[in-house]
Image (cartoon, grey):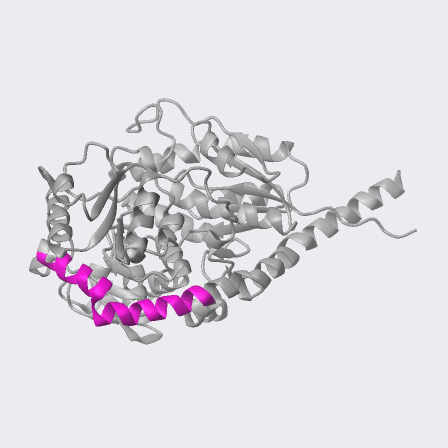
Amino acid sequence: MGSSPLPLPHIAVFPFMSKGHTIPLIHLAHLLHRRRLATLTFFTTPLNAPFIRDSLAGTDASIVELPFPENVPDIPAGVESTDRLPSMSLFIPFTYAVKRLRPHFERALASLPTVSLLISDGFLGWTNDSASKFGIPRLVFYGMGNFAQTVSCKVAVYKPHAGVTSYDEPFMVPGFPHIWLTRSDLEPPFDDPNPDPKDPHFQFIVEQTMATGASQGVLVNSFYELEAAYVDRCNTEGVPRAWCIGPLCLARQTSPPAEKTGWMDWLDSRQRMNRPVIYVAFGSQAELSAAQLQQLAIGLERSGLDFLWVVRAKAMDLGQGFEERVMDRGRVVRGWVNQMEILHHGSVQGFISHCGWNSVMESVSAGVPILAWPLMAEQKLNAKFVVDELKLGLRVRPSGGTPNGLVMSEEIERSARELLVGEKGKEAAGRARNWAEAARKAMDGGASWLTLEKMIEEVCVKRTTENAIVSAALVTAA
């Protein structure tokens, strides 16, 4: 008799409670399901579960809801994701609350069929101890690119900015003589060569870094060809290994909606008139001040360009009469949009973006050049990579030489026009189209396709095979 085929590996997935961290892992779930590489169980909390459940439709993934802690200091009742925090200054208290999920997570993990692998967010470092407790290998997902991860690590370890005297004095990144940064390119605590060891944010970074170092690898939402030098450096010098399996935004196969939204109809009309559109969006967490919103509105109005601008808050004030004055060539959307659908529309020829890594990957995948406007986290490093390394766009600069100053309307008008109709923009658009084709090939039988298969084989199948051998031995012994 022939031997029975081994069961598919069973992967547990635990995203951090933020849509920007969750969505790529949902895309990964669709990819694993479609390729029949694994079965999946997602962990989340009750208020995040409906979004995850809807997003996983069409897969056979199961969902385990962990009760979110109640009466958490500084965290309003009913807030179970960073997208709902009244201020990102509450991020660290939120992580304290999330850590209290550990006993519930471990009880749930123990009740599951054999788990071959845990994929958990880099902000959930405590899950590494949970995985070790059950003998489960863990892979980490940060939602960052290799460039930002590698540069941040080099700066944190070697402290090349220790000798600079100001935030705008350049220093070289060790090991990469072509990369020069300033302290203003870095966010706390990385901008300080001597951070306070008692600072809660610094302690959080150290804790997650140590947990990542003890894991079996890092999943990266990127593709090898895009960041080859940084992937190679990670995997020759760093621990643990980086597995590039993206762009994950290309993993989910979607059918056209039954009914088009109003803004998609409007984009269709722009395409028929051969009028290029610049898309404006800053993600689900970054916020612009009221003064900055006014400058952006003035800049877009004076540019004469057609634009689609997505704003977070319905009550956001863009200036009296603004929407009426630009209604023949501009649309403001308040609420959620399908960003991939917009970026892949033929009329969209440029993207004013905060350079969150998901947005960078979506823009690269769609072949759309970027006007980089970084606001928080590692976005300034992403912007540097997009503009200086890949040359896929341009960058706006705040006034007065201060890193966090206002970007004035004149700068916005000039930069947006250069991106959409200028020579530099046309050159960036040509390179963007080439990278879009490279991204498609990576996910369709290329490097990312093969890397995912190899990762499953090396990390998951080995454990699944060992468990099958142990089970067979127990049956024989009985």
Residue that lies at the very extreme toward the left in this rendered image: 400
> Which secondary structure type mostly characterizes the magenta part of the structure?
helix
Residue 364's x, y, as percent?
Answer: 38, 61
Residue 422 on the magenta segment: yes
Residue 181 on the magenta segment: no
Left or right: 271 as drawn, with respect to 40: left
Q: Is residue 137 visible?
A: no
Residue in front for this viewpoint, 5 or 98? 5
- 353 above or below 79? below
- 237 above or below 307? below
Residue 312 placement: quadrant: top left
Residue that lies at the very extreme toward the bottom in this rendered image: 177
Q: Residue at x 44, y 44 (%)?
A: 23
How many labels, in total? 0
Left or right: 435 as drawn, with respect to 389: right
Residue 395's x, y, as percent?
Answer: 21, 62
Residue 352's x, y, as percent?
Answer: 25, 55
Residue 428's x, y, as percent?
Answer: 30, 69
Quadrant where the C terminus lies? top right
Residue in front for this viewpoint, 116 or 430? 430
Residue that lies at the very extreme toward the front in this rendered image: 272
Residue in front for this viewpoint, 38 or 311? 311
Q: Residue at x 54, y 42 (%)?
A: 13
The boundaries of the magenta stretch are: 410-437
Q: Is residue 346 visible?
A: yes
Residue 171 placement: quadrant: bottom left
Q: Residue at x 44, y 48 (%)?
A: 122
Q: Residue at x 35, y 70 (%)?
A: 431
